[in-house]
């Protein structure tokens, strides 16, 4: 990977499309390649030209990213999640729609009869993006799932007791797809 | 409306001592606001404006979202203390219009398709005004957008030309604006000479218009260089860290 020392700003001419393949941070107009971000120029061995941004760029959820969100709605076959942030990109608001969807088939590896058995309204969940365009999420892994939940009856905090969650105040027991990070405050 | 005639040109110089084709001094500072995603402070003579960019972020209300691209929201606002007489705070006819034309001046350079269903908020606050605040605002907003890491095809530069005592001059100040015969703010992409905003108030003959446009174009190139330098200076050594 060859790296040029040059710093460019949007609109700086970098080369022609005969010389380079445009990568990220650049755009092609009439066969000329210009920078679209502020940063350093980098040219790969395959002559892909890119601008490595020096500025912080707007975060978007990509496939495989871990996101944190809250259950907003529960339907027959899916749960609607309002995504708060993408792991590793917490500094800025996410530059996309924040409504993600967990389909019943992506909740866990076993058979799920009802979404309500795994999630409840206002649960905080950790999930992985499986389709960035439509914001489909999955909680199949061990570390994914509910990381914080409140009691349906008294709204008190639920504590993890083995494979279930128990309310300390009213002793109600609830089931969820629990993340192994439940209640740790870890993301 | 009759305006009193006053002498705006003395011995081939303007009242503030500038030549006809001279810009007021410009100062640009990038990343002045901690909590904005991108910001810029811009001084053009006695004009002081600050631009803040937030987003792209989810567009609310949702029915204003565009499924194919980001929506740009631009707010030009004058502080109550920015003018001699206190300005009544809040949007008015003038600032709504300026917001609209300024948004459209920046619109063609922003690559909006990368962030569908989002809004890019641009807030321009005029802290002190001395004619030409919309052009200062566009210059500031353009730098702030670049600092926010929003993909852009180019930077937009903007300047006004005007007519005082029958002469076409560059970059009017408040006195010249009030007592002059015309004012023409221009925004353009300096590299390609693409005009993205062109307004005119007063009367210009065709020759005067063409001369004014040429003046504006050379001034925009100068401003572009300053904008560029400001960005380069801000981001040359830092490694993306400490982004304000």
Image (tube, rainbow, N blue to C red):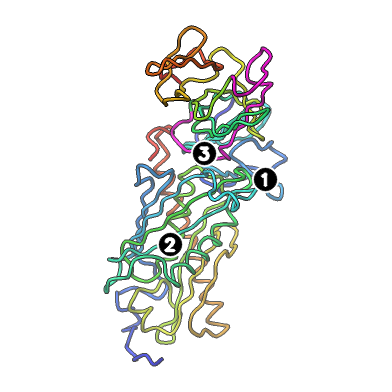
Badge 1, how many Cα within 10 Å: few under 14, some, many 20+?
Answer: some
Report, in whole angstroms, how far the alpha carbon at label 2 lies from the one at label 1: 32 Å
Q: Residues within 10 Å of mark 2 (few under 14, many from 20)?
A: many
Distance, label 1 to label 3, CA atoms, is: 21 Å
Instruction: Kindly indicate the quadrant of the structure image that contains residue B137.
Output: bottom left
Point out the frontmost of discs 1 and 3. 3
In the image, what residue occupies the spot 40% across and 45% down? B36
Pick whichever of labels 1 and 3 is earlier in the sequence.
1
- Mark 1 sits on what residue? A28
Q: What's the distance in space between the residues labelled 3 and 2, CA to CA?
A: 23 Å
Quarter of the image with the C terminus of chain B is: top left
Give left or right: position of A21 versus A129. right
Say the numbered circle drawn on residue B76. Answer: 2
Q: Quadrant of residue A97?
A: top right
Determine which of the numbered discs, if any, sits on residue A58 in the image.
Answer: 3
SS at badge 3: loop
């Amino acid at each position: 990977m060859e790296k040029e020392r040059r710093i460019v700003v949007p609109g700086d001419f970098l080369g022609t499309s005969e010389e380079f393949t445009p990568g990220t941070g650049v755009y092609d107009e009439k066969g000329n390649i210009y920078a679209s971000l502020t940063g350093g120029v980098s040219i790969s061995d395959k002559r892909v030209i890119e601008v490595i941004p020096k500025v912080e760029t707007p975060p978007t959820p990509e496939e495989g990213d871990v996101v944190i969100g809250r259950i907003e709605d529960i339907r027959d076959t899916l749960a609607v999640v309002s995504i708060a942030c993408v792991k590793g990109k917490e500094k800025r608001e996410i530059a996309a729609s924040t409504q993600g969807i967990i389909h019943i088939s992506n909740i866990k590896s076993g058979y799920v009869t009802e979404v309500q058995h795994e999630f409840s309204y206002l649960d905080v969940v950790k999930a992985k993006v499986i389709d960035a365009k439509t914001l489909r999420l999955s909680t199949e892994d061990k570390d994914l799932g509910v990381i914080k939940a409140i009691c349906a009856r008294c709204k008190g905090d639920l504590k993890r007791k083995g494979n279930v969650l128990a309310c300390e105040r009213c002793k109600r027991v609830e089931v969820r797809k629990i993340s192994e990070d439940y209640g740790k405050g870890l993301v | 409306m009759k305006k009193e005639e006053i002498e705006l040109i003395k011995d081939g110089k303007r009242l503030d001592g500038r030549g006809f084709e001279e810009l007021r001094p410009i100062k640009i500072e990038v990343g002045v606001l901690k909590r904005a995603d991108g910001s810029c402070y811009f001084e053009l003579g006695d004009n002081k404006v600050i631009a803040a960019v937030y987003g792209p972020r989810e567009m609310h209300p949702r029915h204003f979202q565009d499924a194919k691209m980001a929506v740009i929201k631009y707010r030009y606002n004058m502080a109550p203390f920015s003018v001699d007489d206190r300005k009544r705070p809040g949007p008015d006819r003038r600032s709504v219009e300026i917001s609209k034309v300024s948004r459209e001046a920046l619109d063609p350079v922003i690559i909006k398709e990368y962030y569908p269903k989002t809004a890019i908020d641009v807030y321009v606050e005029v802290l002190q005004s001395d004619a030409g605040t919309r052009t200062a605002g566009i210059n500031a907003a353009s730098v702030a957008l670049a600092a926010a890491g929003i993909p852009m095809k180019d930077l937009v530069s903007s300047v006004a030309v005007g007519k005082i005592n029958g002469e076409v001059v560059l970059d009017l100040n408040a006195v010249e604006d009030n007592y002059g015969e015309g004012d023409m703010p221009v925004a353009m992409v300096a590299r390609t000479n693409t005009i993205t905003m062109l307004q005119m108030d007063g009367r210009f003959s065709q020759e005067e218009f063409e001369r004014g446009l040429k003046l504006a174009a050379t001034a925009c190139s100068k401003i572009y260089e300053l904008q560029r330098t400001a960005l380069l200076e801000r981001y040359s050594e830092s490694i993306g860290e400490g982004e304000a």
